[in-house]
Amino acid sequence: MGVSSGVVSGRAWLLALLVAFSFWLGCFVASVAFGHWAANLTPFPKPAAEVTPFITGIYGWMRHPLYTAVGSAFLGWGLVRGSWAALFCTGFLLILLDRKGRREKLHLVSIFPGYQDYSSRVKRFIQWVY
């Protein structure tokens, strides 16, 4: 793979660039999304009743930017470490975040009338992909 103990060697500069991009993209997306939700964050899939969903800004590109950020940062870290175990855990984390996002959608559709339309226009994690 060209990555050994977190040190880039040989022609692995492209992988290093991808890793850095993945990690920093995750950090950037998290900081932007966190700014919107800071007071309303909850670890549970059911949002607080008084919360109004954001559908503009970064939320116009992805419905779950914080989940995207966490997944992206973990992927970058796993690649930097060159660890199959870390990449396996990242995959498991992404599955959990996807399931949590699906449960959140059920709650949000029942609470907010326009959420179904929004969710059909905007992908969960990466616009035009998923």
Image (cartoon, helix red, strand yellow):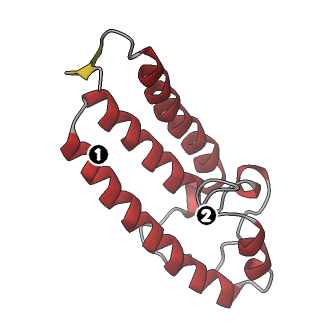
Q: Crowdedness of circle 1 by 10 Å Cα count: few (<14), some, many (20+)?
A: some
The numbered mark at residue 124 is: 2
Q: Residue 59 at x, y = what percent?
A: 71, 56
- The answer to whether residue 10 is above or below residue 70 is above
In the rendered view of the protein, which quadrant contains the N terminus?
top left
Residue for point 58% across, 35% down? 28
- The answer to whether residue 84 is above or below residue 60 is above
The numbered mark at residue 128 is: none
Assign a secondary structure to mark 2. Answer: loop
In this rendering, would 106 be left or right of 84?
right
Q: Residue 18 at x, y = what percent?
A: 49, 28
Depth check: give the residue in front, 5 or 10: 10
Upstream in sequence: badge 2 or badge 1: 1
Depth check: give the residue in front, 33 or 121: 121
From mark 2 to mark 1, how far is it between C-alphas?
21 Å
Residue for point 59% across, 53% down? 65
| Residue receiving disc 1 | 87
Residue for point 21% across, 42% down? 84
- One can see residue 46 in this view: no
Asked whether disc 2 touches disc 1, contact meaning CB atoms under 8 Å apart, the reply is no
